[in-house]
Amino acid sequence: MTRLLRKSFTTVAISITTALSIFNTPAFAHNGEHHEQPDPVEPTPVEPIDVNTKLDIRKNVLDLNSAEKSAFVDALYTLKNTTLEGSTISIYDQFVAQHVASMGMMMMDAVGIGAGHDAAHHHDAFLPWHREYIHRFEKTLQSVNPNITLPYWDWTDPEAIDFIFQPDFLGTNGSGVILPTPGGGTFEGGPIQTGNFSEASGWVLNPNLHIDPITKQTSQGTSLIRFLKLPPIDQYPIPQAAVNQLLAHDNYSDFRLDLEGFAFDQLGNPVFTNHNYIHGLVGGAGFDFSTNPPTPVPIGTMSGVLSSPYDPVFWLLHTNVDRLWAEWQDNGHSGSAFYPASGQPYGHNLNDRMWPWDGGQTTPGMIGPGDVVSLLPLFSSDDLVTPKDTLNFRKYGYTYDTLVSSVPEPTCLWGVLALGILGTAVPGKQKRLGSNGKI
């Protein structure tokens, strides 16, 4: 394990020492696409909710009490240590496999209508795909403890980072690997050694799913790796002004591009921000200035993106991403008029089926040192989800503490259906009566 880590970290040391300011660095070269979208027509109203329907409330992680923090951690460990009949990996690892395989769509041996493009990133289904994905994960957590809802990390709050990264909550920074930093200093990070989510605590990663994001073929080992606030990605919190600018967009494609983390400065240069910045803040990343434009060099589990759900902070990050989208939608951008109907790769347009909820239209290619496809859960042929199905987040049975007062007037009743674990139902057409934090 040590040799594996040392080899990986040596390759990025030079790029870290030569890195400049993160906010002046171009974004991923292949991710900065901008897709024009026609001016929207009148927005489609948010579908009404019956007054008796109870919505689960996702709240700020800072508002979790000790019992709620413990319950969340316990449920994560339960999923990590539970294997369903017919599977060779845990329930938690199956979710990681889905995220990894979504990027396997870009591999040469991917087959089907959605092949050639990442199913979950770099294009406009980034938000719908992750809304569906984290909702299914939340429902699976609730199969362990029905009182749990996913908390969000408001990355503009200066107190959140120290609250989250504690040994008795989501774990600490890694240690054991020292890297040089810009200006002649050094920084220590690496595998989490003690406390929650360390290998010693039972948080052991599947080496076939913990994949080196640079080679996409080799493993990063069995330990969760963090280089929390490794320069140059060490500026925290993200300014509130950046979020205000994000929410001011009227065009969905511009909003998604900014929220995913490919924004532009006043000179039109792309900058690394929001979602992408937090991935790098937690995992650590340098930049390779030998390429034009400079390319990011991820180091830790979170910054690698591929296997990032192995870090439990992934769920807090993406819940905040979903919250910001929900707030933007509630602020006059609801409905299908605010999502592109065409012009995207397949799987990203309004009525396209999104993998893996596509009825088997596409099969990912091989990615990583093992056969990721064989590790995926089975999805029913009628488990179909399009971006359009995800646009009304309240149909999923949840809201956010920042949106409690904005629930639309009720005029009809939605049915309440049970949701099976992983790939057995279509949450976009269901509701759940929550059991804590209700309205």
Image (cartoon, helix red, strand yellow):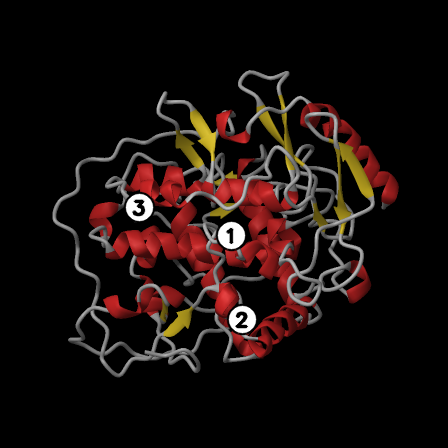
SS assignment at label 1 = loop
Query: Where is mark 3, residue-wise?
Result: 247
Cβ–Cβ below 8 Å for labels 1 and 2?
no
Where is the C terminus found, in terms of image quarters? bottom left
181 horizontally vs 40: left or right: right
Instruction: Residue at 45%, 61% (x, y): give it.
Output: 381
Q: Is residue 293 left or right of residue 366?
A: left
Which circle's residue, 2 or 3, is located before the other in the chain?
2
Q: Earlier in the sequence, mark 3 or mark 1?
A: 1
Q: What's the CA distance linking mark 3 and mark 1? A: 20 Å
Residue 87 position by quadrant? bottom right
Kind of residue sitting beneath label 2: Thr
Instruction: Depth check: give the residue in front, 12 or 375.
Output: 12
Reading the chain from its start, which is encountered first: label 1 or label 2?
A: 2
Mark carried by residue 66: none
- Looking at the rendered structure, the kind of residue marked 3 is Leu
Q: Position of residue 338 (x, y in %)?
A: 24, 46
**Relative to 428, does residue 263 appear above or below in the rendering?**
above
What amino acid does circle 1 point to? Pro
- Identify residue for label 1: 158
Residue at 20 percent across and 70 percent down: it is 48
Q: CA distance from mark 2 to mark 3?
A: 30 Å
Residue 372: x percent and y percent? 65, 49
Q: Is residue 43 above or below residue 170?
A: above
The residue wearing badge 2 is: 140
Q: Label 3, secondary structure: give it.
A: helix
